[in-house]
Amino acid sequence: GDIIVEPLIRTTISDDRGEEPRYVGYAASELCEKGYGIEDVIGLLWNKKLPSKEESEIIKRIIMISADHGPAVSGAFGSIIAACAGIDLPQAVSAGMTMIGPRFGGAVTNAGKYFKYGVKEYPNDIPGFLNWMKQNVGPVPGIGHRVKSVKNPDKRVKYLVDYVTNQTTLHTPCLDYALEVEKITTAKKDNLILNVDGTIGCILVDLDFPEYSLNGFFVLARTIGMIGHWIDQNNQNSRLIRLYDYLINYAVKEEREV
Ligand code: Q5B
């Protein structure tokens, strides 16, 4: 008789059993032909929805603005060190990727999650929200920057906030809430601004992207930059990096006899 096999996995996003891949039912070539962009493919594969033109423009700007932030940041620096050690592209990029976490670039998901929580549970009580965060979570994801501050604002953040609020019709409760939080945190300390992770996290929540997808935007965007740094170092035939002694504080014991 027939042998019934339980499927090993279940997918709800794509299907390649026909002539070409279909993303949530849409043929990839047809999307290209009809003028859709990578931001629409992201909407399909990450949120199972074709974004509106206005939503696509926001997604595109999020990716463009977070694609790179120079060589000094943890991710690019990790990829550059790897490139200089002669490591191949995928591994060098994954060295940089490894840096994406709660302090660097990987605060997008939790920023979206907790600001959304604040909107729901502490709508008119930001001090209450900050107190809850302090007791239950720790530093507020999406707030704070190593070098950007009220006196040295992050142009990326200003641009995205301005674009979304003044040039689109998107309803932005999460972003509005985070900007109110920023007013209180920056009054305490100049660098406790709404950072790029927090800004994109809130905009993506307002765009109705699923919580689990949010860090994916930074990961995807920054992959573009990390690949760029790997190519750049290879083009220059860069040498192996070894830190000079003056860059290290050797807080070790004096030489001793055993
Ligand atoms: N404090 C980002 O810290 C950083 C606080 C806070 C309450 C906070 C810190 C943080 C949350 C995680 C986050 C994304 C580690 C950052 C990014 C992409 C990037 C990177 C680039 C790019 C910086 C000093 C004092 C302490 C802390 C208090 C700090 N943050 N309190 N909520 N969120 N943020 N990450 O300056 O009393 O002195 O003990 O963890 O959103 O990654 O460009 O570089 O595009 O590549 O090193 O933009 O803010 O300060 O950690 O020594 O703290 O401030 O409790 O208080 P710092 P810390 P106290 S965007």
Image: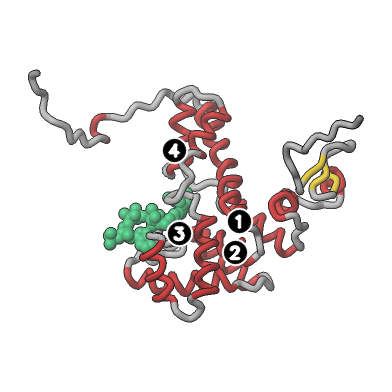
The structure residue drawn at horizontal position 38% and vertical position 60%, both measured from the top left corner, is 138
Distance of mark 2 from mark 3, alpha carbons?
14 Å
Circles 3, 4 touching at the beta carbon (< 8 Å): no
Tell me where residue 58 appears, x and y as whole percent: 66, 61
**Residues packed near mark 4 inside 10 Å, few (<14), some (14 to 19) or many (20 plus):** some
Spatial CA distance of label 4 from label 1 is 22 Å
Distance Cα–Cα, label 4 vs label 2:
28 Å
The first of marks 3 and 1 along the sequence is 1
Q: Nearer the viewer, mark 3 or mark 4?
A: 3
The residues tagged by marks 3 and 1 sit, at their Cα atoms, a distance apart of 18 Å
Tell me which amino acid carries mark 3.
Answer: Pro
Q: Which residue is mark 2?
A: 203
Q: Which residue is mark 4?
A: 77
Q: Which mark is residue 141?
A: 3
Is disc 4 in contact with disc 1, using a CB cutoff of under 8 Å? no
Q: Nearer the viewer, residue 65 or 176?
A: 176
For this view, does 120 lie left or right of residue 34?
left
| Amino acid at the residue labelled 2 | Ile
**With respect to residue 137, does 236 lie above or below?**
above
Q: Which residue is mark 1?
A: 62
